Amino acid sequence: MKKRLSQVAEFAGVSETTARRVLNGATDVSPATRDAVLTAMDVCGFERPRQLQQERAALVGLVVPDLQNPIFPAFAEALAGLLNKRGFIPVLCTRTADGVSEAHYIDMILKQNVGGIIFIGASYADAGPEQGRALRERQIPIVLLNAADENAGVAQVSIDDAASAQQVLAHLSALGHRRIGMILGPVGHVPSAHKLAGYQAFRARQGDSEGDWRKLVAHGLFSMEGGATALPRLLEGGVTAVVCASDALALGAIRAARRQGLRVPEDLSVVGFDDSPYMVATDPPLTTARQPVQAMAAAAIASLVSQMKGHATEGESMMFDTELIVRSSTAPPSRSRSR
């Protein structure tokens, strides 16, 4: 019992005496301290005293497609920290290599005291028809963060992908690039479609028809392999710069460029998206569009908590701007490739 009490007290940030008083039902403890201790009991896996078992903190599911894309763990970490501060218990739900799906996790948390679900880079449609129906029937609060699909009537927090794409294109254009390619995620991926719309609008302002630029756009999986596979076709189109829909795609494009004897940025400028950890330490350091992860996480939780309190947020949409982080992977085009 002594070891358990010390673990709970350490996690809650209180003394063992305070933790003991909460567990003994003392009434002169502040609500915030009481919630912190009870949440610590849940997180540490200890059973609450019988008289407090009906006050278990609500679980909040954090559903992500995978943990390979660095932006997903970044959002999960930010959300988990904010949820803990509010007394909720975050539960990470992600597809695994051994076949465990998001649907499996959702089935599990629906059997618990679930308070809501935040889908990161996914949507409740990905969970499967049965799980989606159960979520709607039980009116579980849901927030979509950079949703992969169109989902009318659900609260959403996202990046203004079209504006972000145009910001990056303006940077490359100012450097003197005219043949600018784009590597996007799979066809049908909504954030990629929005980036493509921004690209199309930018090219239209320059007087280019779709026939002029369509061959400079490629789609692929969000991975280094996807970027490496897509780049050669764009190089055949004479691009001197390429905008990628993720940092992983950008790193793959850089690898493919080097395989063809091209230097980055002297022969090819490359821009990523997300400003994932370590992009400042790549060779060369990657120019990328940074997502405001903390601000977006805070907005997602505020929307979720509002729903949990009974406020209607159907169709609510919050959009955030990215910040262009200019590093060493972009430069003016060389004369030999810009002709």
Image: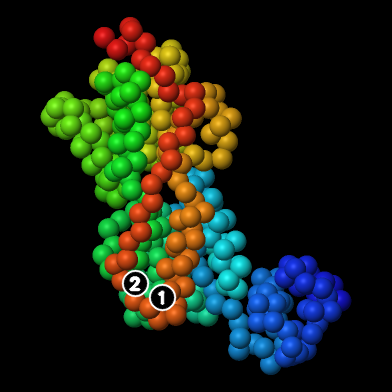
Q: Residues within 10 Å of mark 1 (few under 14, many from 20)?
A: many
SS for callout 2: loop
Q: What number is the disc on residue 313?
A: 2
Q: Quadrant of the N terminus?
A: bottom right
Do residues under tags 2 and 1 come within 8 Å of each other at their CB atoms?
yes
Residue drawn 70% across and 77% down? 33
What residue appears at the point 61 percent right and 82 percent down from the top-left corner?
56
Which residue extends farthest bottom?
Answer: 51
Quadrant position of the C terminus in the picture: top left
Q: Which of pointers 2 and 1 lies earlier in the amino acid sequence?
A: 1
Residue at image mark 1 = 307
Q: Residues within 10 Å of mark 2 (few under 14, many from 20)?
A: some
Q: In the rendered structure, which amino acid carries the disc numbered 2?
A: Thr
Q: Relative to residue 70, is residue 50 drawn left or right? A: right
| Residue 130 in view, yes or no | no
Q: What is the residue that sits farthest to the right in this orientation?
A: 2
Vertical order, 285 against 162 (above or below): above
Q: Quadrant of residue 229?
A: top left
Q: Is residue 108 left or right of residue 242?
A: right
Vertically, is 180 above or below 312?
above
How far is disc 2 from disc 1 in space, using C-alphas?
7 Å
- The quarter of the displayed image where residue 170 is located: top left
Colour option used: rainbow
